[in-house]
Image (spheres, grey):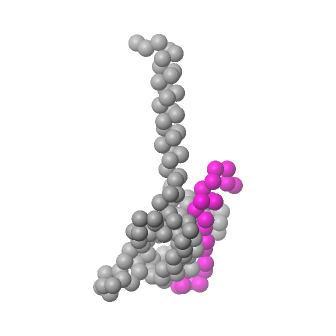
Amino acid sequence: MRPPRQLASVLLCWLALAAQTAHAHHSFAMFDFTKVVTITGTVKEFQWTNPHVVLWVNVPGKDPKKPDVWYLEMTSPGNLTRGGWSRKALNAGDKVEVELNPLRNGDLGGALIKATNQTTGQTFSTNLRDMEKPGLQ
């Protein structure tokens, strides 16, 4: 059996590593915040889940029978609710215009800035980096 001091050291090291892993989740390095792209399409799915709300938008592509599917990440449902969003803000089939910061690797996706629901006329915005800061109230 290990002495209590050695066991405590192992436990502290493990906790420090776990904390770094959790903190690393909130890196936004994958998004290019120097660029803004606008897309127009139809909501494929609006997933209101933790830790991040996700929106998939079908955008007409080169093949008219197969749309391009864009993946858009937002902050948590709690942060979005405080910003005026709701789980019913966007629904499958709604026509939308979306402004986003694209993914750096060129894939079809990014961090959502603003979504205009052309079906209802409502506009919703978010700022992923500001809303994810610790201590946001």
Residue 113 image point, x, y percent: 57, 70
The foreground one among 17 and 50 is 17
Please provide percent x and percent y for residue 123. Answer: 61, 78
**Number of marks present in the image shown:** 0
Residue at 44% of width from left, 69% of height from top? 109
Up-down relation of residue 114 to residue 61 (above or below):
above
Which quarter shows the N terminus? top left
Q: Outermost residue, right direction? A: 137
Q: Is residue 92 magenta?
A: no
- Where 74 sits versus 16, above or below? below
Q: List x then y, in percent, for residue 136.
A: 67, 54
Please state if 137 lies on the left or on the right of 120 as rendered. Answer: right
Q: Position of residue 47 (x, y in %)?
A: 46, 65
Q: Which residues are magenta?
A: 117-137
Residue appearing at x 52%, y 57% in the figure:
28
Q: Can residue 45 be seen in the rendering of this structure?
A: no
The residue nearer to you, when weighing 51 against 105, is: 105
Residue at 43% in and 14% down: 2
What secondary structure is the stretch in magenta mostly built from? Answer: loop
Task: Indicate whether residue 127 is drawn in magenta.
Answer: yes
